[in-house]
Amino acid sequence: MTTSTPLLKDELDIVIPTIRNLDFLEMWRPFFQPYHLIIVQDGDPTRTIKVPDGFDYELYNRNDINKILGPKASCISFKDSACRCFGYMVSKKKYIFTIDDDCFVAKDPSGKDINALEQHIKNLLSPSTPYFFNTLYDPFSEGADFVRGYPFSLREGVPTAVSHGLWLNIPDYDAPTQLVKPLERNTRHVSAVMTIPKGTLFPMCGMNLAFDRDLIGPAMYFGLMGEGQPIGRYDDMWAGWCTKVICDHLGLGVKTGMPYIWHSKASNPFVNLRKEYNGIYWQEEIIPFFQASTLSKDSTTVQKCYIELSNQVKEKLGKVDPYFVKLADAMVTWIEAWDELNPKQGSGKKLPNGSAK
Ligand SMILES: O=c1ccn([C@@H]2O[C@H](COP(=O)(O)OP(=O)(O)O[C@H]3O[C@@H](CO)[C@H](O)[C@H]3O)[C@@H](O)[C@H]2O)c(=O)[nH]1
Ligand SMILES: [Mn+2]
């Protein structure tokens, strides 16, 4: 009896940022075991992270990051889940799925375990529809299609660069919301996947996220957070805003919705408030900046787009706070490090829809 090879088995890495033993992998074993893991160990590099037997993985701690990147390691956050982006950089695969170690297997409305990885792969392997909203949600999903009035000229869609999954139980709320609603739990499994329309930003959460590394990897920099930085818990948000502006420019799609994971524990809202407070204030300037950002037609690769964006960050957000000058420089360092570790990528090869990588 032939068993089917798991989808994208040799083309996808699972990136996990962690400060603890990875017992949670036991429950994911049926879904994750065939895949290669990249574990980014944050915090004290002398700690040993226990990984359950039978998983194929590589593990990087801070000493490894410093050794591999040298001075460029300064762009990788320390003592913050933002460190996970180092895993994206060292991967050699076309796809990435990143998940937090407190995200467990959720059950769908029928009570069946959700294979989050399988759903992300489906999302990534089918086109997105950013130019015209399909009211029956993802037209490429089982039992759905384009509805009447949907232009046939737009039905081919565009390549999907990002698949943003959601969470049952502890929702990804900011600290103020968490403080006023400490007992709120998300019990709603909305069985939908939809493309985020072109020109619309969204709050990208990094705890259940997959993306096409070849299409958008260099834009997935999780910024300067954690130790020594005036901001935290805006790592994934920053990456999401940069990514969406670049996806819109290059004609790539971003999907959100299924799959759901079970987010098992809430982090401390008071600690989170301390990490977030600058971000909550600054984002009232950051969002208009990204909404107004335009990239030139010469920016035909993700790297070129990202460098152009970093110049805009320095010029326009540098006035908000000197932190953004430092961040803009770190964005350039990130691209330099990315290109050093991934020399072939960004060779300007044309993508199906004419934009270049
Ligand atoms: O210093 C640290 C702290 C944690 N990690 C690892 O990162 C993930 C997320 O940690 P945790 O679940 O404790 O934090 P949350 O508040 O639930 O995470 C959300 O906040 C977002 C902003 O960073 C994040 O993407 C969301 O998931 C775990 O795997 C920890 O082990 C770390 O590496 N370093
Ligand atoms: Mn968590």
Image (cartoon, grey):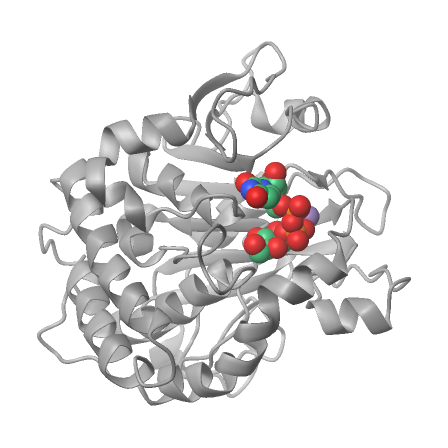
Asked whether 119 or 16 is in front, the reply is 16
Question: Is 298 above or below relative to 46?
Answer: below
Where is residue 308? Give x, y as percent. 18, 72
**How many marks on residues?**
0
Where is residue 200? Give x, y as percent. 46, 82
Q: Quadrant of residue 312?
A: bottom left
Residue 157 visible (yes or no)? no
Question: Is 180 above or below relative to 85?
Answer: below
Asked whether 39 or 66 is in front, the reply is 66
Q: Residue at x 14, y 80 (%)?
A: 296
Where is residue 219? Give x, y as percent. 31, 59
Where is residue 325? Give x, y as percent. 27, 71
Q: Residue at x 44, y 27 (%)?
A: 9
Residue 331 visible (yes or no)? yes
- Apparent side of residue 5 relative to residue 252 in the rendered image (left or right): right
Q: Quadrant of residue 29?
A: top right
Q: Quadrant of residue 172?
A: bottom right
Question: Is 314 above or below relative to 205?
Answer: below
Asked whether 108 or 148 is in front, the reply is 108
Question: Is 9 above or below relative to 16?
Answer: above
Q: Quadrant of the C terminus?
A: bottom left
Q: Residue at x 45, y 59 (%)?
A: 229
Q: Quadrant of the N terminus?
A: top right
Q: Residue at x 81, y 69 (%)?
A: 179
